[in-house]
Amino acid sequence: MCEALGVDRLNSWSRVNCVHNGLYEYFLKYVLHKKEDRDDSIYKVTGGISHDIIERFYTEELAYEKMAEEFDEGWMMAFDIADLKFVRGDGARNNSIATKYYYDLKNFFETHEKITDHIDIEKFVTVKVGDEYYQGYIDALVTDENGNYTILDWKTSSIYKGDKAKNECGQLVMYSLALHQMGIPFEKIKIAWNFLKYQCVTVQSKKGVKKVREIERFELGEKLQANAKMWLKEFGYEENMLEYLDKLAQTNDITCLPPEVQEKYELHDCYVYVDLTPELIQYWENFIINTMKMIRDKEATYAELKAAGKYDEADKLWWEDEESLKKQSYYLTNLCGYSTKLYKPLKAYLDAQDAKKNGDILGTKNKQDEEYDIDNLDWLNDL
């Protein structure tokens, strides 16, 4: 395909986004082509498991009632057997996140509302942005009877709202450009995420006013306590109110409530849409073009420095500054696939922080102490 398009490579959103997660990560992955040496993060694995289950369901390889069972098996392999981590170096926090994460995703697979419109899973697209070509796979491309398209991404992360949603929708906008270049008007295209960990819950006031709330599945019972209490009282269940409320908190299931109270709620999968405005499209086009120009410039400079034998300077070209490393410290220490053995700027940053904390007490480190234990990150809480 590259030859047909007259380009040296087909880019991807992952390549663009990688630079902003970690510049040195980009260098390791796309310039040096280094294999990741950390495989103990559970986020990528559980995300992959969830995507695979959904894909197999919509391609009719997996029955609806088998989805939760498949997730259980995948979870057991990842968390219980492989001992993958949500948080490296903090067992209590890791287990707390795991308990909630497991409940949220298991509940999604037990209650998912099947999309009934036409749906293409893992739809391959190519798109030209500026002078560069990109390729990618849309998680789900949904087409309704009126010829409207929804570019849908399954997300196992925390929910995006407001400015956060606009700042995270670059991949979806890039895919909308791909559809547009295929002849589909932007007016016919929507972009959205389905946040698997959440439900959209419609609650009512006594005056009949409805409000939609996005609630993480594991805490639905707690979040509905006040509203449920109001309706239980309204329908004369005061005598058994505490029992109902306790059961709601324990089960996160509104079916434990009396039928007339249940009718006051609507529960749906959590879809978050971002308006595909001309301004948003232009912003992300510029973002992609400018990012790729920066990448190309750095790659060219790196090649020149390397050819001149300036290997250390060439390597340092990709180092992030201290502020960037501090900002991305959670990602780099918990989600990044490269350890400090390969991620040199992170190693230097952590060692410098460690020296600030312990230098006066411990003095200069011995040579055998140079290998920093990445799992011991308690001091990062002070940053």
Image (cartoon, helix red, strand yellow):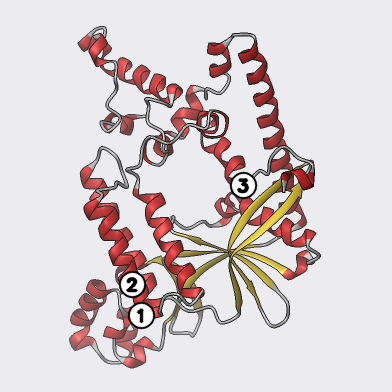
Query: Which residue position is annotated with label 3?
Result: 13
Q: Which residue type does callout 2 highlight?
A: Ala
- Residue 70's place in the image compared with 21, above or below, is below
- Residue 182's place in the image compared with 368, above or below, is below
- Labels 1 and 2 touching (C-beta < 8 A): yes
The answer to whether residue 202 is visible is: no
Q: Which x, y percent locates residue 324?
A: 50, 29
Number of other residues with Cα within 10 Å of mark 2, as a class: few under 14, some 14 to 19, many 20 or more: some
Q: Which residue type does callout 3 highlight?
A: Trp
Quadrant for residue 36, please give it. Answer: top left
Query: Circle 2 — which element?
Result: helix
Q: Which x, y percent locates residue 96?
A: 25, 53
Which residue: 29% across, 40% down?
A: 88
Q: Which x, y percent locates residue 356?
A: 32, 16
Query: Which residue position is annotated with label 2?
Result: 68
Q: Which residue type does callout 1 highlight?
A: Glu
The answer to whether residue 164 is visible is: yes
Query: Circle 3 — which element?
Result: helix
CA gap between label 2 and label 3 equals: 30 Å
